[in-house]
Image (spheres, rainbow, N blue to C red):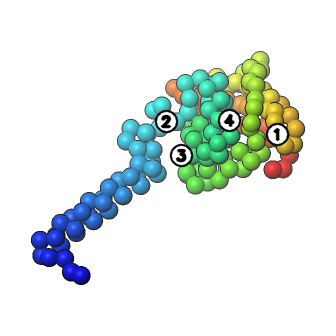
Amino acid sequence: MTASSGEGPSIRAAVLVMAVAGFALAGCASHGGAGAEYGTELYGAESAEAAIVRFLDAARLRDYSAMARLFGTDEGPAERRWGRAETEQRMFVLASLLEPRAWELRPNPVAGAGGASRWMVDLTGRRNGAVSVPFIIVSDGNRWFVERIGTEGLGAP
């Protein structure tokens, strides 16, 4: 079946519009969408505690992209240094090690340079048993990031 001469250009235009929309959406997905540049609410968290809670929630859901947006240093998100793919691969490993099902946060009186703080996270409900894990949280001056997690006592996934 062939399209009449009136339908051909409109079909081609519709396909072109869909292709352009697809590229635009792919750009939003890979860059976080309009206004999702570093320093906005999509990277980091408003407090050290929020950074930990959101990171653990994302790890429980295996949302590696959300974890990556919360992982970084006092210079900003880790994916700026490692790239999105490598950061999400690292978040896969962390989520597998942490296995967060339930947890309790305990502020630890250890403060580091530049406003870094150490929190202890008591993870329970894990197949390898309960464990306390230190989280080092830092701020870039605007947002808070999970910088380090003491994974030594977590065991292999």
Instruction: List the residue tagged with mark 4.
Output: 56
Give, as a three-letter code, the residue at label 3. Arg
Q: Return the disc, 3 or 2, that comes first in the chain's sequence.
A: 2
Q: Pick whichever of labels 3 and 1 is earlier in the sequence.
A: 3
Front tag of 2 and 4: 4
Expressed as whole percent of the image width and height from the top left, the position of residue 49 reads: 65, 24
Q: Which amino acid type is marked by label 4?
A: Leu
* Residue matched to label 1: 126
Q: Residue placed at 22% from the left, 69% from the top?
A: 12
Q: CA–CA distance between discs 3 and 2?
A: 14 Å
Q: Kindly indicate whether the residue at mark 4 contacts the one at mark 2 (C-beta within 8 angstroms).
A: no
Residue 132: image location, x then y, percent: 83, 31
Residue at image point 51% right, 26% down: 142
Residue 17 falls in image quadrant? bottom left
Given this view, does label 3 or label 2 mark the residue nearer the observer? 2
Q: Identify the disc placed on residue 116.
A: none
Q: Which one is closest to the eye, mark 3 or mark 1?
A: 1
| Disc 2: CA contacts within 10 A as few (<14), some (14-19) or many (>=20) | some
Please tell me how crowded label 4 is: few (under 14), some (14-19), or many (20+) other residues with Cα within 10 Å.
many
Query: Which residue has dot 2 on it?
Result: 42
